[in-house]
Image: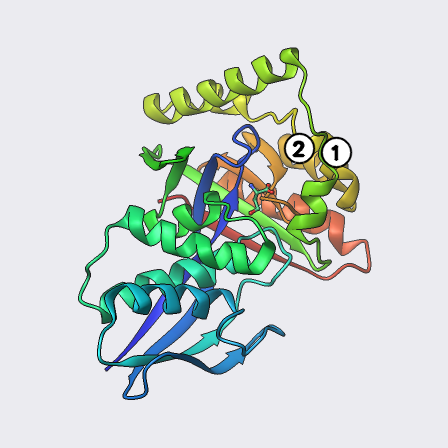
């Protein structure tokens, strides 16, 4: 009894939704194989693509698997083979991909006892193991797919948002590593009332744009006054990529999660690919290695 799954990378925040919005990128994700074992408990048989711990009480994927086995207490254990395609410290929800993938796969092996909301709760334990905070935006996007809103944390409430038919995402991942913890430490502990109003109005505008297929409203709402002003300094050529991406027709350009990956939303595949080219042009002139993915949001 074995199951092979794909767990998508994700863009968290999506500019105006700090810790609240997430979307799945189908073009890249971790692959994982979960195999039932007679020995109880969780082990990791293989990790390819990243230097991660084989300690099953510390690795994000296996921490999630342990929690689910402890809850159901089946008469089997599980071993995990992890093929990491989403690089740690990329801002593409690397630990979330493994955590969400583990929750999804374990649910299948256990006979589907859990809802998506419960799977998100389990997956948050992997996030906590990996980066210290049980953030839900990436894991919920990987589990639900498409575009999601973390409406509240206590109790956890996830809202699946509608996605306009022609919404595409472009991401460029410059291969430098930024730890989420470090990117959270550069944020200010307080927000002015003026900025709180701006951010919440933008978030409302974006959500409204998603419900009404209003690409212009989506575009006007993709602004972040809480994290981007502080985090962009950590990302080489951020302003150039953003300006050229917008010139190439993107609806908006921002930091994917805690960076260094940048994302752009576009109307239609053609513009999304033009935006990818504009991003490629900038990093091609540097010594920075990078990956680019273009994907329909759905
Ligand atoms: N919302 C999180 C952040 C994403 O921006 O710090 C990383 O999980």
Coordinates of residue 64 in the picture (x, y in percent): 41, 63
Does any atom of ligand 1 lie closer than 8 Å to the CB of label 2?
yes
Q: Which quadrant of the picture is home to ligand 1?
A: top right
Residue toward you, 240 or 16 = 16
Quarter residue 189 falls in? top right
Residue at the location (70% across, 60% down)? 175
Residue 215 appearing in the image = yes
Q: Nearer the viewer, residue 41 or 11?
A: 41
- From the top left corner, tell me how far across and down residue 33 is, in percent: 37, 76
SS for callout 1: helix
Relative to residue 66, is residue 243 drawn left or right? right
Q: What is the number of callouts on the image?
A: 2
Q: Is residue 269 visible?
A: no
Instruction: Check residue 230 in the rendering and tell me which mark sits there, or answer none.
Output: 1
Are the residues tagged 1 and 2 within 8 Å (C-beta)?
Answer: yes
Which quadrant does the N terminus fall into? bottom left
**SS at badge 2:** loop
Q: In the image, is 16 to the left or to the right of 2? A: right
Seen from the viewer's position, the closer of residues 67 and 160 is 67
Task: Please tell me whether residue 191 is drawn above or below residue 184 in the rendered image.
Answer: above
Of residues 66 and 94, the one nearer the viewer is 66
* Residue beneath the point at 60% across and 51% down: 91
User: Residue at 36% across / 79% down in the picture?
Assistant: 41
Q: Find residue 147 and report its horizontal and vertical position in percent.
A: 39, 39
Q: Quadrant of the C terminus?
A: top left
Q: Is residue 67 above or below residue 284?
A: below
Residue lying at the far bottom in this picture: please name it: 38
Q: Residue at x 45, y 56 (%)?
A: 125
The residue that mark 2 highlights is 227
Disc 1 from disc 2: Cα separation: 6 Å
Instruction: Answer few, some or many: residues within 10 Å of disc 2's Cα (few below 14, many 20 plus, some between 14 and 19).
Output: many
């Amino acid at each position: 009894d074995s199951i092979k799954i794909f767990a998508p990378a994700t863009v968290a925040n999506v500019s105006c939704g700090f810790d609240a919005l997430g979307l799945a990128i189908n073009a890249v994700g971790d692959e994982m194989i979960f195999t039932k074992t007679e020995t109880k408990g969780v082990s990791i048989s293989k990790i390819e693509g990243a230097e991660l711990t084989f300690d099953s009480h510390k690795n994000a994927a296996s921490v999630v698997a342990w929690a689910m086995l402890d809850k159901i207490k089946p008469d089997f254990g599980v071993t995990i083979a992890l093929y990491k395609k989403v690089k740690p410290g990329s801002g593409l929800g690397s630990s979330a991909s493994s955590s969400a993938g583990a929750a999804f796969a374990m649910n299948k092996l256990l006979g589907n006892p859990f809802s998506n909301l419960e799977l998100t709760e389990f997956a948050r334990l992997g996030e906590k193991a990996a980066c210290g905070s049980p953030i839900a935006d990436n894991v919920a996007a990987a589990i639900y797919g498409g575009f999601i809103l973390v409406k509240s944390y206590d109790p956890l409430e996830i809202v699946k948002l509608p996605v306009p038919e022609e919404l595409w995402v472009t991401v460029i991942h410059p291969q430098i590593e930024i730890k989420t913890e470090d990117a959270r430490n550069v944020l200010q502990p307080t927000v002015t009332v003026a900025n709180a109003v701006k951010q919440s109005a933008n978030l409302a505008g974006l959500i409204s744009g998603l419900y009404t297929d209003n690409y212009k409203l989506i575009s006007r709402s993709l602004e972040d006054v809480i994290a981007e002003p502080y985090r962009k300094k950590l990302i080489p050529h951020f302003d150039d990529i953003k300006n050229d991406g917008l010139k190439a027709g993107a609806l908006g350009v921002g930091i994917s999660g805690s960076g260094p990956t940048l994302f752009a939303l576009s109307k239609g595949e053609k513009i999304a690919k033009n935006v990818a080219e504009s991003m490629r042009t900038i990093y091609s002139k540097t010594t920075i290695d990078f990956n680019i993915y273009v994907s329909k949001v759905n």
